[in-house]
Amino acid sequence: MAEILVQRAGSPDEFTRRTTIAWINEFVKLGGDQFCPYYADIVGAILPCISDKEEKIRVLARETNEELRTIKVDPSEGFDVGAILSISRRCGFSNLIKEARSRF
Protein backbone atom coordinates (compact mmCIF):
# COMPACT_ATOMS: atom_id res chain seq x y z
CA MET A 1 0.00 0.00 0.00
CA ALA A 2 2.81 2.42 0.87
CA GLU A 3 4.39 1.93 -2.56
CA ILE A 4 1.14 2.82 -4.32
CA LEU A 5 0.63 5.94 -2.22
CA VAL A 6 4.19 7.08 -2.78
CA GLN A 7 3.72 6.74 -6.54
CA ARG A 8 0.42 8.63 -6.53
CA ALA A 9 1.81 11.51 -4.43
CA GLY A 10 3.50 12.85 -7.55
CA SER A 11 0.32 12.86 -9.62
CA PRO A 12 -0.35 15.94 -11.76
CA ASP A 13 -3.96 15.81 -10.52
CA GLU A 14 -4.43 18.03 -7.45
CA PHE A 15 -7.21 15.91 -5.93
CA THR A 16 -5.11 12.76 -6.24
CA ARG A 17 -2.09 14.43 -4.60
CA ARG A 18 -4.19 15.82 -1.74
CA THR A 19 -5.94 12.51 -1.12
CA THR A 20 -2.67 10.57 -1.29
CA ILE A 21 -0.86 12.87 1.14
CA ALA A 22 -3.85 12.70 3.50
CA TRP A 23 -3.69 8.89 3.45
CA ILE A 24 0.07 8.87 3.96
CA ASN A 25 -0.38 11.29 6.86
CA GLU A 26 -2.94 9.04 8.54
CA PHE A 27 -0.87 5.91 7.99
CA VAL A 28 2.19 7.57 9.51
CA LYS A 29 0.16 8.75 12.52
CA LEU A 30 -1.34 5.30 13.06
CA GLY A 31 1.61 3.12 12.09
CA GLY A 32 4.56 5.17 13.25
CA ASP A 33 7.71 3.09 13.27
CA GLN A 34 6.03 0.26 11.33
CA PHE A 35 6.68 2.38 8.25
CA CYS A 36 10.45 2.43 8.75
CA PRO A 37 11.09 0.27 5.66
CA TYR A 38 9.21 2.89 3.60
CA TYR A 39 10.50 5.98 5.41
CA ALA A 40 12.82 7.11 2.60
CA ASP A 41 10.14 6.62 -0.04
CA ILE A 42 7.57 8.51 2.03
CA VAL A 43 9.99 11.37 2.64
CA GLY A 44 10.72 11.46 -1.08
CA ALA A 45 7.00 11.69 -1.79
CA ILE A 46 6.11 14.38 0.72
CA LEU A 47 9.08 16.74 0.48
CA PRO A 48 8.13 18.04 -2.99
CA CYS A 49 4.56 18.50 -1.74
CA ILE A 50 5.76 20.90 0.96
CA SER A 51 6.09 23.50 -1.79
CA ASP A 52 2.96 22.48 -3.73
CA LYS A 53 0.89 25.29 -5.24
CA GLU A 54 -2.19 24.04 -3.34
CA GLU A 55 -2.21 25.17 0.29
CA LYS A 56 -4.07 22.12 1.61
CA ILE A 57 -1.42 19.84 0.13
CA ARG A 58 1.38 21.96 1.62
CA VAL A 59 -0.24 21.83 5.06
CA LEU A 60 -0.73 18.05 4.92
CA ALA A 61 2.82 17.52 3.68
CA ARG A 62 4.29 19.65 6.48
CA GLU A 63 2.18 17.84 9.06
CA THR A 64 3.28 14.47 7.70
CA ASN A 65 6.91 15.59 7.73
CA GLU A 66 6.57 16.60 11.39
CA GLU A 67 5.01 13.23 12.22
CA LEU A 68 7.87 11.44 10.47
CA ARG A 69 10.40 13.48 12.40
CA THR A 70 8.93 12.31 15.73
CA ILE A 71 9.40 8.63 14.90
CA LYS A 72 12.33 7.12 16.75
CA VAL A 73 14.14 4.75 14.43
CA ASP A 74 17.02 2.36 14.77
CA PRO A 75 19.31 1.83 11.76
CA SER A 76 19.85 -1.76 12.89
CA GLU A 77 16.13 -2.45 12.33
CA GLY A 78 16.15 -1.78 8.60
CA PHE A 79 16.14 2.03 8.63
CA ASP A 80 18.30 3.23 5.75
CA VAL A 81 19.88 6.56 6.70
CA GLY A 82 21.75 6.68 3.38
CA ALA A 83 18.49 6.56 1.43
CA ILE A 84 17.09 9.46 3.45
CA LEU A 85 20.21 11.53 2.85
CA SER A 86 20.15 10.74 -0.86
CA ILE A 87 16.52 11.80 -1.21
CA SER A 88 17.13 14.92 0.84
CA ARG A 89 20.01 15.91 -1.41
CA ARG A 90 17.90 15.27 -4.49
CA CYS A 91 15.13 17.47 -3.10
CA GLY A 92 17.59 20.16 -2.00
CA PHE A 93 16.98 19.96 1.73
CA SER A 94 20.42 20.52 3.19
CA ASN A 95 19.03 21.33 6.66
CA LEU A 96 17.39 17.90 6.83
CA ILE A 97 20.72 16.31 5.94
CA LYS A 98 22.48 18.19 8.74
CA GLU A 99 19.78 17.16 11.22
CA ALA A 100 19.92 13.51 10.16
CA ARG A 101 23.67 13.42 10.54
CA SER A 102 23.46 14.88 14.03
CA ARG A 103 20.86 12.26 15.08
CA PHE A 104 22.88 9.23 13.98
Image: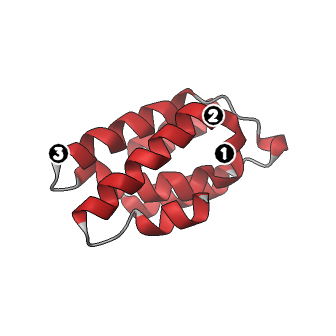
Query: What residue occupies the far right of the structure in this picture?
Result: 76
Residue 95 has which mark? Answer: none
The residue carrying mark 3 is: 55
On the image, the x and y values in percent for residue 99 come to 50, 35
Secondary element under disc 2, as helix, strand or loop, is helix
Q: Amino acid at mark 3?
A: Glu
Q: Secondary structure at mark 3?
A: helix
- Who's the residue at 27% across and 72% down the image? 12
Q: Residue at x 40, y 62 (%)?
A: 9
Question: Which residue is more in the foreground, 82 or 38?
Answer: 38
Would you identify the image quadrant in which residue 61 lies?
top left
- Amino acid tagged 2: Gly
Mark yes or no: residue 47 visible: no
Q: Which residue is mark 1?
A: 35
From the viewer's perspective, is 11 left or right of 52?
A: right
Nearest the camera: 39 or 85? Answer: 39
101 sits to left or right of 67: right
50 on left or right of 54: right
x and y percentages locating residue 101 in the rendered image: 59, 39
Q: Amino acid at mark 1?
A: Phe
Q: Residues within 10 Å of mark 3 (few under 14, many from 20)?
A: few
* 3D distance between C-alphas at marks 3 and 1: 26 Å
Compare marks 3 and 1 and give the one earlier in the sequence. Answer: 1
* Gap between marks 1 and 2 measured at Cα: 6 Å
Label 1: how many Cα within 10 Å (few below 14, some 14–19, many 20+): some
Query: Residue drawn at (52%, 53%), measured in percent from left and top?
Result: 42
Residue 42: tell me if it is visible.
yes
As drawn, the label of residue 32 is 2
Q: Are marks 1 and 2 in contact (CB under 8 Å)?
A: yes
Dot 2 alpha-carbon crowd within 10 angstroms: few under 14, some 14 to 19, many 20 or more: some
Looking at the rendering, in which quadrant would you find the N terminus?
Answer: bottom right
